[in-house]
Image (cartoon, rainbow, N blue to C red):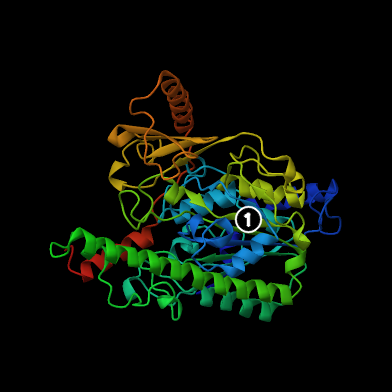
Amino acid sequence: MRIHLGSIGQRRAVRFARLALLSVLLAATGAGCASEPPPGPRVRHVVVISFDTTRADHFGFLGNPTVATPRMDALAAESIVFSDYMTVVPTTLASHTSLFTGQYPHHHGTPRNGFMVNTANDMLAEILAAAGFYTAGFIGSFALESRFDFAQGFDHYDEEFTVMVGDNGAEQNERSAREVTDAVIAHLDTTGVPDRLFLFAHYFDPHRPYTPSAPYDEMYDSEGFAGLPPIDEITLSADLTDTQKLRLLHRYELAYAGEISYMDAHVGRLFDDLDRRGILDDALVVVTSDHGENFLEHQMIFNHGLSVFQTTMRGVCLFRLPRARNGGVRVDGLVASIDVLPTILDVLGLEPPAGIDGESVDLLRIGNGLPPRARFGQATKPETEETDPRWVNMRKARCIREGRYKFIEIPYMQREALYDLIEDPGEKKNLLENASPETSALAARLREDLREWAASARPLASDFEQRQRDETLERLRSLGYID
């Protein structure tokens, strides 16, 4: 459904008043005022586009010669591209909350899908609304529904889904890239272009079950996906050889590629519409992905959330400044999803909330490179390991990235690994096996830093959303799984 959040906003009146006061103070100092933009490119609008479950290695501008992504490649040529971008958590709601707060999950408090976003968080839409932006969000899946309080700060939030859970193998209510773009265009046709617009569009297509529309269903696989057995049926089959299983599972990789190209085309339609309305050249455009997807590289195939390998932690990230300033710059230094919010606010001349975990990147002087930084990540599954009272994800897989090295610790399995991502981007060679003294010393330092980070968990309160729990139980009852 499409909702206007006036009623929801009433219960946040105190917080909005505080943010409004912040806006007045910023205006008084000349920062973030619409009539007196900060030095550099004048930014009237902010456009954030999020790709769900999208691997960075499926785009031409990031080195893939096979998957067709012409619209994103064209945008990248006009943008600052971060080639080493990591999410801090590989689950949709937790990842987007980190994107919109600049906080690690063990601070903003949302551990995974289905939980509530604590209203004490200062969300990007709230901050921009207080600074005078009209805020409009359009989402592609149930995971970001307003029932979870992710919609804090939005004047308009469009969550009208057409594919319900169970349809065509859908794992949750969703809609296609075409429908998300159509909804944005229809809304702007109705409202016109506000003086200052914050537009958030979330595209869900590369998520399972990978069912691209024609002609993208046969773009990389002439047989199409119709008739493909379900993934679990393939892996558990006693009638298929390993070679037959691998061939069928590889076809799912091709279906995923079709979803990427389909999404690229409809995001391109959105860019065309924003350009036609005069929005694009006055906008800061941010495109990112909330997490990737594991194929056959590691366990938990065609899934995410259980591990912190690069397949699920590496994502897409680019910033297009107004009139493509600094377009074509490629940045190889490490940047994480928690750095996006402070970077957006830095371009706007707005101060970020106090105490956030992320750091801004100076997009106007990006040619000077990035200072070294460590970034952390944590898995959200399995749910059976949520037994530590300090933080529900405390015992799950976690990692620290520092330069070329990545250290992984999995407390509930009592396992750890160290990888050199330059020499071993696929994370196949654990350097802790037959480690040299130098390698052992590096691992010891990274282990200590990672455990210190984990011990810093001070999550805001978050509970599993009760209405979803009741609906899930009712669905299980209707299927005969429980009494």
232 to 458, vertically: above or below: below
Residue 229: give x, y in percent of width and height: 25, 70
Residue 375, given in percent of the width and then of the height, sits at 53, 38
Q: Position of residue 72 (x, y in %)?
A: 60, 65
Q: Is residue 181 visible?
A: yes
Disc tally is: 1
Q: Quadrant of the C terminus?
A: bottom left
Tell me which residue sits at (60%, 52%) in the image: 123
Residue nearer the viewer, 390 or 269: 269
Q: Callout 1: few (<14), some (14-19), or many (20+) C-alpha neighbours within 10 Å?
A: many
Residue 13 seen by the camera: no
Residue at (49%, 66%) from the top-left corner? Answer: 67
Seen at 33% across and 77% down, the residue is: 223
**Horizontal and vertical percent position of residue 377:** 47, 41
Identify whether 408 is placed above or below 235.
above
Residue indicated by mark 1? 318
Of residues 7 and 78, which is closer to you in this image?
78
From the viewer's perspective, is 444 left or right of 73? left
Residue that protrudes farthest toward the top in the picture:
437
Is residue 260 or residue 96 the one in the foreground? Answer: 260
Q: Is residue 440 left or right of residue 169?
A: right
Element at label 1: strand
User: Residue 283's image quarter?
Assistant: bottom right
Q: Amino acid at mark 1?
A: Leu
Residue at the spot 49% in from the left edge and 27% down from the top edge: 449
**Depth order, front residue of 470/77:** 77
